[in-house]
Image (cartoon, grey):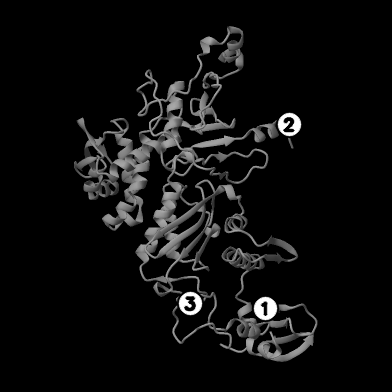
Amino acid sequence: MTPEELEMAVQRHCTSKLQDERLVQIRTLGFRGEALPSIGASARLSITSRTSESDTAWCLRVDGGIITPPQPSSGPVGTRIVVTDLFFATPARRKFLKSPRVENSHAESVMRRLALSAPQCAMRVTLDDKLLFDLPEQSPVARAAAVLDTTPDTLIPLDEERGHIRLSGFACGPAKTRATGSGQFILVNHRPVTDPMLRTAIRVAYRPVIERGRFPVMALHLKVPLERLDVNVHPAKTELRFADEAEVKALVIGGLGRALGHGSSGGGGIHASFGIRPSRPSISYPPRLDVPVNPPVRADAPATLPFAAPSLSRPSTSSIPQTERSGFAEQDAGFTPAARPPQPVPEHLDPAFPLGASVAQVFDTYIIAVAPDGDLVLVDQHAAHERLTHERLREQYASGALRSQALLLPEVIDLPRREAEALLARSEDLSRLGMDLESFGPGSVLLRSVPALLGTKDVQGLLRDVGDELANDPDLEAGNTDSFSNRLDAILARMACHGSIRAGRRLKPEEMDALLREMERTPRANTCSHGRPTWLKLTRSEIERLFGRIK
């Protein structure tokens, strides 16, 4: 800038970017031209600038609103702005600042949002002589990975459109969560925002796949026509007003839901790290493999599970010499009675089955499998089957085909009065879930049918859990059926938990393989209904690091 332009830059509204007198068609982050004058009014501001045609730079200073005319100075071509002694002219405002740690955190958060909104710009941030980040010019995925503190292969890309609105960006899987919403970065027309409506939509989309109380990590970019967006709602421009909030919310919920709704065939192995133990594991998503919808089925597959086991060409242990098989005996190999003897691994594993072939069951709860790439896979049989049952219940409920099974003798269930009343108030909605009940005196209900998919086991425990959830949800006490609909998924999760394979049940090799194949085809199979991981992956390098073979 020239000396004349320097003096104009610190005048109110002289750098306004508005093209007319209306606050419409806002394309820039700032638009009123008040930032530099406001900073100069409360702090010490210096601006040094030099044009390519000038032999010298010029420096202008503003101290507490007092402007010192530009003076010749040294400096390269370009502009450098330095702000020191924040709020020295407004000590009353300084008293309301929080602790240095909190204010430093706010400053870092602002800079990370700006870095995400402009990946084409290099950014370097230091705080108390400590380098926070130094980012070169990057691609959007590389910048998102750097800001979110993860690796590019853990990010799920999004690109969705609904009408004239487009949602793009990157989201982390359900295992990459935080205790707060600090890992959620949202851009609207390249403007960093913290809009509560958008955060609510994100929470709804992730609710089926993460634990309650945890927050997902993502970097989303929403593009909305300028005439359908009002950015002049909040002084900091962090909250927005949309012409059609329902349309925007539906796009965010639907887009994230589709990105998260793949089975284990799309990768999603939660890599267990034993070298450096993170607070929570992270998920990686390699390119999706095409999995046959109906893989080959064994003729002798057991009918104890609601799915059939495909053939993996597993050799029989009888073909192994006795001298080699003796090491598999429980008493010789040191296996406890809670462990299943290991099975031989097929020589050739089909890459279409990413979870590989099962080789053993440990503690009658965890399945050990070998993936086609040689990695070790650990599966929680109860958590995995719970997700499979949950998705079948969800599909049946959505199609209105959740069939009920009448009880031969209706069950009389005694409950606290509050829970019984909550159940009876939702009797019509519960009947859609296959549970028909009626009043049977104060504090008692008569249960006549249960969902056919779950059978008749533990019906009292199921109804007590559902009644407790309905009675204790604040949204449901108001008697709003729409609120109940929003909680149906949680109730389906409770039903799935009661109808799943329990920990402690011994499975046959064919049953274990069948469970793995069904996981590869079922949406959201990487986590259970409560958001916990269903399977972990331990790579060969991690195993070798444990044994000291590599550093």
Q: Residues within 10 Å of mark 2 (few under 14, many from 20)?
A: few
- Label 2 to label 3: alpha-carbon separation: 59 Å
Which amino acid does the dot numbered 1 rest on? Leu
Relative side of 358 to 393, left or right? right
Could you tell me which quadrant the N terminus lies in?
A: bottom right
Residue type at tag 2 = Arg
CA–CA distance in space, label 1 to label 2: 54 Å
Mark 1 vs mark 2: in front: 2
Q: Which residue is mark 3?
A: 26
Instruction: Please provide percent x and percent y for residue 252.
Output: 42, 58
The circle on residue 86 is 1
**Does 410 appear above or below 132?**
above
- Position in image of residue 364 (x %, y %): 49, 25
- Residue 452 in view (yes/no): yes
Mark 3 nearby-residue class (10 Å; few <14, some 14–19, many ≥20): some
Precedes in sequence: disc 1 or disc 2: 1
Rounded to the nearest whole Å, what is the CA distance between mark 1 and mark 3?
A: 29 Å
Among the 4 quarters of the image, the one containing residue 311? top left
Q: Can you tell which mark lies on residue 549?
A: 2
* Comparing labels 1 and 3, the label whose residue is closer to the camera: 3
